[in-house]
Amino acid sequence: MLEACVLATILCGFFGIILKKNLVMKIVSMDVMSTGVIAFYVFIASREGLFTPIISEVKKAAYADPVPQAVILTAIVIGFSIQALMLVGVMKLARDNPTLESSEIEKNNTP
């Protein structure tokens, strides 16, 4: 059930990027899709029976690998910075164009 919710989140973000014409809504859809992908990686990386190597008193057990956690944290930070950069680009486009609809912006900027 959780897998279906995560995949539905990814698909909602993907179809939002394709179907929405407003640039801000495209950025929000990309953020939703990114959140779904991160949730998918967390879901795959979390396995039962793995112990934290720092807190656990168990001497011989399967320990959790910290590398996927570091990759996910890095993906969150990179996603945030990309989103901020795209919003700055949309703000610059909003200065020159009366609308944020992608088709109208393309129509206004073609020679």
Image (tube, helix red, strand yellow):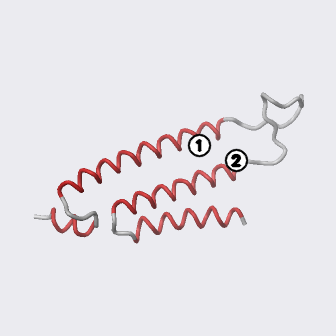
Counting from the top left corner in percent of width and height, residue 110 is at 14, 64
**Which label is found at residue 89?**
none
The three-letter amino acid code for the residue at tag 1 is Ile
Q: Is residue 87 above or below residue 99?
A: above
**Which label is found at residue 45?**
2
- Location of residue 3 by image quarter: bottom right
Secondary structure beneath label 2 = helix
Counting from the top left corner in percent of width and height, residue 38 is at 59, 51
Near-viewer residue (63 or 107): 107
Q: Residue at x 84, y 44 (%)?
A: 49
* Label 1, residues with CA under 10 Å away: few <14, some 14-19, many ≥20: some
Could you tell me which quadrant the C terminus lies in?
A: bottom left
- Location of residue 26 by image quarter: bottom left
Q: Which residue is identified by label 1?
A: 72
2 relative position to 103: left or right: right
Q: Are marks 2 and 1 in contact (CB under 8 Å)?
A: yes
Secondary structure beneath label 1 = helix
Marked residue nearer the N-terminal end (2 or 1) = 2
